[in-house]
Image (cartoon, grey):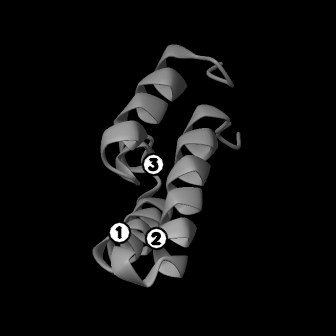
Amino acid sequence: MAGQGSGGNVIAALCNVFIPGLGQLVQGRILAAIVFFVICAVGYATFWLVIPAIVAAIAHLWSIIDAAKFRPML
C-alpha cells in the first residue's frame, strides 16, 4: 500500500519542484494537476504585480506538499 513517504510520492513531489502540477499528473490526478499548473503559471507570468507571484509561490509549495502526502482512496 503506497502512502506518505512512498517512492511514488517522493517522485511526484520532486516532479512538482520543477513543474507545478506534474506530480499530480504522475499520480493520475488530472484535475488537481491542471489547477495547480494554471494558478502557478498565471501567478508567475504576472510576477510584476507582486501579489499573484506570492499566491503562485504558495500554490507551488502546496502542490509539492500535496503530492508528497497523497494517499489514494481504496
Question: Which badge, 2 or 3, is on the more N-terminal residue?
Answer: 3
For the point 39% across and 53% down, which residue is it? 20
Q: CA distance from mark 3 to mark 1?
A: 19 Å
Give the x, y percent position of residue 67. 55, 40
> Does residue 18 sit above or below 1 in this rendering?
below
Q: Which residue is mark 3?
A: 24
For the point 53% across and 42% down, which residue is it? 64
Question: Which badge, 3 or 1, is on the more N-terminal residue?
Answer: 3
Label 3: state its secondary structure.
Answer: helix
> Does residue 46 sit above or below 27 in this rendering?
below
> What residue type is disc 2 on?
Ala
For the point 59% across and 33% down, which residue is it? 68
Give the x, y percent position of residue 14. 41, 29
Q: Which residue is mark 2?
A: 53
Label 1: state its secondary structure.
Answer: helix
* Neighbourhood count class around disc 3 (C-alpha, 10 Å): few under 14, some 14–19, many 20 upward: many
Asked if the residue under mark 2 is in contact with the one under mark 1, i.e. CB atoms within 8 Å, the reply is yes
> What residue type is disc 1 on?
Tyr
Residue 3's quadrant in the figure? top right
> What residue type is disc 3 on?
Gln
Q: Which residue is mark 1?
A: 44
Q: CA distance from mark 2 to mark 3?
A: 21 Å
> Does residue 36 sit above or below 50 in this rendering?
above
* Neighbourhood count class around disc 1 (C-alpha, 10 Å): few under 14, some 14–19, many 20 upward: some
